[in-house]
Amino acid sequence: AEAPWANAESRLRELWLQSMGLGPAAGAGLAELLRSSRSLEELSLVSNTELGDAAGAAMAWALQENTETRLRTLYLGATGMGPAAAAGFVALLRSNRSLEELDFCKFPALGGPTGVALADALCENAETRLRELDLENTDMEAAVREAFEALQRTRPQIVVKLDS
């Protein structure tokens, strides 16, 4: 059976798939959706812990390829993504101009050097529209926290949610 999001010409604007038990195979389909959709504005994949690193990386690269994306909101908390996905999203955020809200809760790969790279990417992207970045429960090293605190000073329009 074809996935309900498979028709790239659809007018799908929101797709909420929290806690659906999605795994790597679904991630490949979602990456294709992100590569081709010109209508999707909001995607929530929260608590699909088996989605995994390769799926996350594929989704990040797919968004980079889609220069006409309208995706504004992306919720990826607790999706089992790791270093490859984190690196893909760092690359994406160096130039992305559509995302306004991004949830990376429980994304441990952003707790170390890749987290610093993410903060740097957002500092470098003069055209970012990001307004909210949720990094709660990422078990951050001190250098990562400092990088995001510096980002907030440089780009006060971006609200970064960190653990207290």
Image: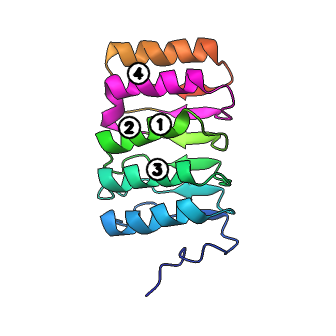
Q: Which mark is residue 64?
A: none
Do residues under tags 3 and 1 come within 8 Å of each other at their CB atoms? Answer: yes
Marks 1 and 2, Cα distance to the nearest angstrom? Answer: 6 Å
Do residues under tags 4 and 2 come within 8 Å of each other at their CB atoms? Answer: no
- Point out the frontmost of discs 4 and 2: 2
- Point out the frontmost of discs 4 and 1: 1
Marks 4 and 1, Cα distance to the nearest angstrom? Answer: 13 Å
Marks 3 and 4, Cα distance to the nearest angstrom? Answer: 20 Å
Residue that mark 3 sits on: 61
Query: Which colour scheme appears in the figure?
Result: rainbow
Q: Earlier in the sequence, mark 3 or mark 4?
A: 3
Do residues under tags 1 and 2 come within 8 Å of each other at their CB atoms? Answer: yes
* Residue 132 percent coordinates (x, y): 60, 34
Marks 2 and 3, Cα distance to the nearest angstrom? Answer: 10 Å
Q: Which mark is residue 91?
A: 1
Amino acid found under the numbered disc labelled 1: Ala
In this rendering, the answer to whether 141 lies above or below 17 is above
Q: Residues within 10 Å of mark 1 (few under 14, many from 20)?
A: some
Q: Which mark is residue 87?
A: 2
Quadrant location of the N terminus in the rendered image: bottom left
Q: Secondary structure at mark 4?
A: helix
Decide whether residue 106 is among the magenta residues.
yes
Do residues under tags 4 and 1 come within 8 Å of each other at their CB atoms? Answer: no
Amino acid found under the numbered disc labelled 4: Val
Q: Secondary structure at mark 3?
A: helix
Amino acid found under the numbered disc labelled 3: Trp
Residue that mark 4 sits on: 116
Which stretch did the figure color magenta?
A: 105-134
